[in-house]
Amino acid sequence: MAESIYGIRTRMNSGGSSSPSSSDSDINDTCSELSWERERRQYRQSHRNRRFSATSVCTNPEEDVYVMVLQNRQGLSEDLKSIFTLKDICDVTFLVGEDRKPIKGVRAIIASRSKVLYELISAHEKSPRHSKYSKRSLLMKTLSRLSCTGVRHRTVDSWRELTIPMTSFDPESFQRLMNYIHSGTLTVDSRTVIGLLNAAYTFGFPEMRQACWDFALGCTARADNLQDMFESIAIYKSHKMTVSLMKMLKNYVEGCPALNSYTALIEEILSNDSNSTSNDI
């Protein structure tokens, strides 16, 4: 019986032994080639699976117009995450918290995702204190030096740097908000859920607000999660969603001896609500 594998033929005798038509080294080389080819096929298949696992294709053959809709939202999300590493693209800086930590973003993306942030950015753009323009990016300087088409006609106005103070949020929560705005992905834990809950309410992200609200209520399953949540509540005492959440958790905390130390904090937050609830940005 004769069998062909990648152009190498072997013969089998009647006793079941084989008589190689090439030397042992040729057979070893063939085995190595087969192993390498198998690994390459497995890699291609796994890469194809990863690429298409986040891709959906929808067709409507029964409609009058036959079209296909291709979606790869995960791929888009991953690409947009890298925008924070491209400093020349980021054109707005938020100075967050008491330490005024700089957190950058892209005005066009931020404005398109939140009407509140759009109005905030527009107000700061029109403010006289931002009339001085920053230097153009290194990329535009290079293009200008190379005399690329249209670069000389670009106005400096489009390259000015915008700085906005954001003192009523903590830097970690606000950074995660920016990640969500730019890529659609949000990571929430017990230390940031209060900040993200109030940010979602303040800047108009209802789906994010509901998710954070449910997560905050889920933190009641473990005392350590509740402790982390209460420890991060300092700068959010007067925010509306903090007050609403404390109303929900008041009875639960009173019935849990391990959390009695937070009863006074809850009473303070709820007493402030009788005066006014501030959500100043």
Image: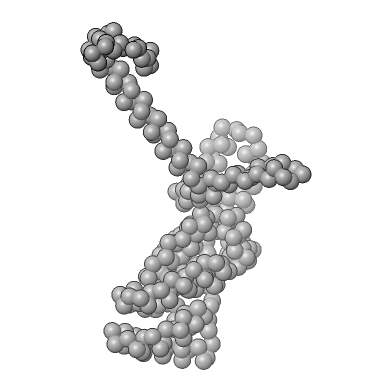
Residue 213 position, x and y percent, is 48, 73
Count all numbered tags in the image, as a single digit.
0
Residue 162 position, x and y percent, is 55, 58
Residue 78 shows up from this direction: yes
Decide which of 204, 43 is in the foreground and name it: 43
Determine the image quadrant of residue 115.
Answer: bottom right
Q: Residue at x 47, y 51 (%)?
A: 81
Residue 27 position, x and y percent, is 27, 15
Q: Residue at x 38, y 33 (%)?
A: 42
Q: Residue at x 46, y 81 (%)?
A: 245
Residue 188 lies left or right of residue 157; in this view the side is left
User: Does 93 sit above or below residue 66?
Assistant: below
User: Does 1 sit above or below residue 101?
Assistant: above
Q: Residue at x 36, y 86 (%)?
A: 253
Residue 23 position, x and y percent, is 24, 9
Q: Residue furthest front?
A: 14
